[in-house]
Every structure is written in structure tokens, then in C-alpha cells.
């Protein structure tokens, strides 16, 4: 399988990465090189094979349903590019 | 006094205990070595004040007789580990001037045991790379050069800063992480020892995530014993990482010097690649001969799905990365590029903040997870991963204790030499190491010799799950036979 220019633009949008028109052909070439490389997986017989979900055989650990953290709003917003009090500031989302 | 930076960690521990020198003296010796080696670009942040204050504290504890196992030992920390109050960037512009308000579990355990932080080490952006060339702080130089040449070579990656700093005697050991070979490949390129423990052995909490089902932290050090000492402090159960295992941490150092008599060592025929340099083949044979001479038994084994590990990795790892890196949105931390609306803000921030390699991987990951392609790519790759793991399980079920392979398909190469036209050329560096991540197994790279140009080459030992001890025992045999290698100082 390979991707065309339209697909490259669609993927870029899904990934929320701005891509200019002159970057598209280059990206298309690189993505297709990667897709050509992984193409060899199609020759593996995976009939009846379970997909891996956990590399170490272990029970999923469950935490107690209790509050054990919090009251650190200052820490949470400490690295934000724009804040007001304990809120993150973003461009207007709802008119 | 001998140069304090040339001591191994084990020797330094002895000297500190005997009060031959203080941690402050040891730390100052390293800080001054770092200053003189800035041309290597191994450190992206030096923390001399913090280092001296930690060293004084360690000296106090040593004097009082309640020193931890790493008391007073100066270390470098890969910039992927969150360090409280000290800038942590994963060497990406998108994290900008991120200063964590918390400490990663692994580093907090190192400080608990008395270690001293010298600073933060360079790495490939978000650990995506095999040459430390994708860092937003620029490439790292390998302290090793070809004989008679002054061309700078890459130290490998992604833990290139860690490997370079340890090899150049700038720190006694370093933290590193390994998703497809990022501890073992740079260790092999710099004649250092690097171990990626079993998945789940070390907590991933507070380490910038790349591909969560593959990421595992470990140490890079100058000897097998030093790496065992560091891993003991780094490993352990952490309730904050649900994939970390609740098993006691063995005294890894006790495995050093244990007899390897009767250990069955698998030699996988699939690792004998067409066009593999003759000197790598020779090194591999030498390694097998050393282990045999120490009493181990060699058996040929087959890992039939080996060649599919790298292509499967380049689906699984980017898929997980695209999901993990979705958090960099220009809203909660790091870089923000303005846009007319929230979508443009996201898109502009991520275009500006991510480097070319990261952008490429996030996009391929997005593609293989997108509607209509998930089954063909991601699901198939996860099935292949099951088969890769089964290859190893079959091998261990036949009584094999560990597997011996070359660590890398070549020695270090020049900066800018590989992957310019085709990204896959660079990816092939991890061909011998990536299977281990796919199967969640422990793997150690140990220096074993040099090529015709005088560059170091390493061997890899792959172990059963949670049997790092056998790797340390076997690794020590190789180290004893091959000797240790130090680069000539040119910086």
C-alpha cells in the first residue's frame, strides 16, 4: 500500500500537524518508504494468532477507588503557556 | 592522586568508604571534565550547584556511617527523566522550558541511595533515533574516532548523550532508556556496558513516554559490575506504574563472578545476516569461544521471525508514539504557536515543536491506527509480535539460558552519514536489538573488541524474563576476556 498527496494531507490533519503544500511530496516519499518496508509483514502467516496485548504475563493491577492525590492546581498550571488563575487559556472555542 | 574520573563506580565506592577522597572532590573532578568536554555536546544542562550540594550531603552521610549503596557517586541523567525543578525537555522544542514539579521514580530511587546529579544528558528527540542526531540541541559526538582521523562520529542513540558522557569519563554512570535498542546500540558504539532490563522491572513513571509497551529504562556504565550496581537502585515495584512488576529486586552485583559452567547459550542462525562485516562475525565467534572456555555450552537455535521484528516495530512504536505525543497540544505545557482557532493552535504548535523524525513517526502512527487500516497494519503487527515472543519462549523451553548475538550490524558512523535519503537506512541499526523489546526480554550489550579502524564493537546477551542475573554473570565473562576500552582524549 502507498499513500497519495491527499492522504498525506488527511493524515497530517488527523495528527494535528500543519503541513505546507511544498512539504507534501517529500513527506509522501518518506511515508511510502516506511510503508514499503513494513509491507513484508504481509507474507507472515498470522492465521489463528492472538495479537499481543501484554508483553509480561501479569494481571492488570487495579487501584483502590480512593482520592490519594490532588490539591496541586499550582503545579498543574505551572508550565502552561497562558493561564488565568488556575485555568488554561485557549482561543475562543464556543461562539 | 590518580584522576578521579577514570575510576569505575565500584572503585569510587571503595575510595569513598575508605575516605581516600570525598564525594565533593569526586564530583568536582567530574564537573571540571564536563566543562572541558562541551564540544561533545553530551550534556544539555549542567547542574553544578545541585551536584555540589548533593555531594556535601552524601559526604555527611558517609561520615556518619549511614551511606546508601550509591552514596556520593556522580551520575548523568538522560533528559527523558523528569527531574524536579530541573528543566526536562526530551530534547524537543515542544517541551521548551518545561520544569517538572515532580521527580521520576527511577531518579528518586537513585537520590534515595545517595547518588549525585551532574546534569541532564542529550538524546534523540523523544528517544526517536539511532544516532542522537534528532535532538533539538544538536548532535552528540562520540569520544571514539577512527584511527588517524578527526571526523566526528555518532555515539548511537537514542541514549547518545548517556553513552558519550560515560565513555568520555564525564560521569560514572548514566540513566538511559531503550525502546528498540536505545541503550544497547549506543553502549556498543562507545565501548560502554548497557542493560535493558525485562519490561516491567523498572518503573516508567516520570519518564517521557515514547512507545509505552516497549519503553524500559536501564543504566549505561563502564563495567558490568557498575551496571549491576546501578540497576539494583533503579529497579523495583512502583504502584504509580501499573506495568511495573511487584517482585523483589535481587542483589545483581552478587551475580558477578558466579560460575557460568553448564549454562546453555543459544546462537541464533537468523542473526547471521548477508553482507555482515567479517569482523562482526569474528567478534561473535570470539564471544562464543570465551563463554565456552568458561564452561558454558553452545547450541545453535532458531528464531524464525527475527526479520519481521523491525518492520513490526515500525508499526507498533509509531502507533503508540502518535497516541502518547497527542498530549503536546500547546495548551497545558511547553511551546505554543498561535492560531486563529484552537485547531490551528494545535497544528501550528505541533508543526513548529516537533522535529522531522518525530513528525514522520507521529504521522505514520496516525495512519496505521486510522479507520480502515488498523487491521491491515496495527493488528497484524501485534500478531507478528506474538510470534516473535513465541520464538524466544520455544528457545528457552528447550533449556537455553541466554542467547548471544552481535549488538549492532556495524561500528559507529559519521555524523550525517546515514538516513538522509531513506529513513529505513537508519532504522536498520536496531536490527539485532529490537526483537528484545518486542518480546519484553532483558538484553545487555558488553564491549568485546574493536574493528580494523579502531572503533569499538559490542556483543549482546538476551536473557529469560527477569533473569538479568545470568546476563551479568555471562557479561562479566566477556568483559574479563575482552578487557575494557577507553577512547584517546582529543577534546
Image: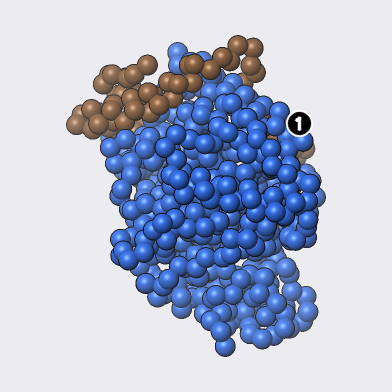
Q: Which residue was labeled with disc 1?
A: B397
Give the quadrant of residue B2: bottom right
Foreground of the two, B130 or B243: B130
> Viewer-proximal residue, B143 or B129?
B143
Based on the displayed image, in which of its 4 quarters is residue B446 positioned?
bottom right
A2 lies left or right of B383: left
Chain identifier of the blue chain? B
Locate the C terminus of chain A by quadrant: top left
Does residue B44 appear to the left or right of B214 in the view shown?
left
Instruction: Give the residue drawn at x 65%, y 35%.
Output: B300
Res. B235 in view:
no
Count of all numbered marks drawn on residues in the image: 1
Instruction: Please tell me the colour of chain A.
Output: brown
Residue at 23% across, 27% down: A25
Across and down, in percent, residue B168 comes to 47, 68
Residue extending farthest to the left is A22
Name the chain under label 1.
Answer: B
Residue visible at 49% across and 32% down in the picture: B310
In this view, the residue farthest toward the bottom is B1
Amino acid at each position: 500500500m502507498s499513500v497519495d498527496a491527499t492522504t498525506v494531507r488527511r493524515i497530517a490533519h488527523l495528527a494535528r500537524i500543519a503541513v505546507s503544500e511544498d512539504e507534501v511530496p517529500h513527506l509522501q516519499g518518506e511515508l511510502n518508504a516506511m510503508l514499503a518496508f513494513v509491507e513484508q509483514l504481509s507474507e507472515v502467516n498470522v492465521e489463528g494468532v492472538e495479537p499481543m496485548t501484554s508483553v509480561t504475563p501479569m494481571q492488570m493491577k487495579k487501584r483502590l477507588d480512593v482520592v490519594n492525590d490532588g490539591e496541586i492546581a499550582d503545579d498543574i498550571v505551572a508550565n502552561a503557556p497562558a493561564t488565568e488563575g488556575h485555568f488554561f487559556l485557549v482561543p475562543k472555542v464556543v461562539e | 592522586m590518580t584522576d578521579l574520573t577514570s575510576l569505575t563506580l565500584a572503585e569510587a565506592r571503595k575510595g569513598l568508604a575508605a575516605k581516600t577522597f570525598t564525594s565533593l572532590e569526586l564530583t568536582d573532578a567530574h564537573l571540571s571534565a564536563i566543562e572541558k568536554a562541551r564540544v561533545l555536546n553530551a550534556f544539555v544542562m549542567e547542574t553544578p550547584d545541585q551536584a555540589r550540594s548533593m555531594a556535601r550531603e552524601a559526604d555527611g552521610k558517609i561520615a556518619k556511617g549511614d551511606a546508601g549503596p550509591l552514596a556520593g557517586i556522580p551520575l548523568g541523567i538522560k533528559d527523558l527523566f523528569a527531574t524536579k525543578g530541573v528543566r526536562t525537555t526530551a530534547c524537543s522544542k515542544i517541551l521548551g522550558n518545561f520544569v517538572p514539579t515532580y521527580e521520576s521514580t527511577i531518579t528518586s530511587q537513585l537520590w534515595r541511595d545517595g547518588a549525585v546529579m551532574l546534569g541532564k544528558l542529550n538524546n534523540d528527540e523523544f528517544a526517536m533515533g539511532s544516532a542522537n542526531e534528532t535532538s533539538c540541541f544538536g548532535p552528540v559526538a562520540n569520544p571514539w574516532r577512527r584511527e588517524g582521523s578527526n571526523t566526528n562520529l555518532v555515539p548511537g542513540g537514542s541514549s547518545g548523550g548517556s553513552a558519550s558522557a560515560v565513555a568520555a569519563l564525564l560521569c560514572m554512570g548514566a540513566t538511559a532508556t531503550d525502546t528498540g535498542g536505545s541503550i544497547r546500540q549506543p553502549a556498543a558504539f562507545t565501548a560502554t556496558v548497557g542493560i535493558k532490563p525485562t519490561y516491567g522491572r523498572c518503573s516508567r513513571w516520570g519518564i517521557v513516554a515514547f512507545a509505552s509497551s516497549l519503553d524500559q529504562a536501564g543504566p549505561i556504565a563502564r563495567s558490568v559490575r557498575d551496571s549491576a550496581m546501578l540497576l539494583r537502585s533503579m529497579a523495583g515495584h512502583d504502584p504509580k506504574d501499573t506495568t511495573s512488576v511487584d517482585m523483589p529486586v535481587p542483589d545483581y552485583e552478587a551475580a558477578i563472578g558466579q560460575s557460568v559452567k553448564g549454562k546453555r547459550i543459544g546462537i541464533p542462525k537468523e542473526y547471521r545476516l548477508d553482507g555482515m562485516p567479517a569482523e562482526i562475525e569474528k567478534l561473535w565467534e570470539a564471544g562464543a569461544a570465551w563463554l565456552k572456555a568458561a564452561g558454558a555450552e553452545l547450541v545453535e537455535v532458531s528464531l524464525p521471525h527475527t526479520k519481521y521484528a523491525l518492520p513490526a516495530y515500525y508499526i507498533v512504536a509509531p502507533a503508540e508514539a502518535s497516541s502518547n505525543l497527542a498530549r503536546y497540544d500547546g495548551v497545558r505545557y511547553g511551546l505554543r504557536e498561535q492560531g486563529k482557532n484552537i485547531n490551528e493552535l494545535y497544528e501550528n504548535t505541533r508543526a513548529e515543536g516537533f522535529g522531522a523524525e518525530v513528525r514522520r513517526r507521529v504521522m505514520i502512527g496516525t495512519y496505521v491506527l486510522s479507520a480502515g487500516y488498523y487491521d491491515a497494519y496495527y493488528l497484524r503487527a501485534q500478531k507478528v509480535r506474538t510470534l516473535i515472543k513465541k520464538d524466544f519462549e520455544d528457545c528457552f523451553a528447550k533449556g537455553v539460558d541466554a542467547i548471544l548475538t552481535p549488538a549492532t550490524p556495524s561500528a559507529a558512523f559519521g555524523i550525517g552519514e546515514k538516513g538522509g535519503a531513506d529513513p529505513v537506512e537508519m532504522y536498520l541499526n536496531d536490527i539485532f536489538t529490537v526483537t528484545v523489546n518486542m518480546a519484553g526480554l532483558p538484553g545487555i550489550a558488553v564491549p568485546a573488541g574493536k574493528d580494523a579502524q579502531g572503533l569499538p564493537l559490542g556483543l549482546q546477551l538476551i536473557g529469560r524474563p527477569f533473569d538479568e542475573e545470568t546476563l551479568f554473570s555471562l557479561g562479566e565473562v566477556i568483559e574479563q576476556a575482552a578487557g575494557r576500552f577507553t577512547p584517546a582524549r582529543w577534546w
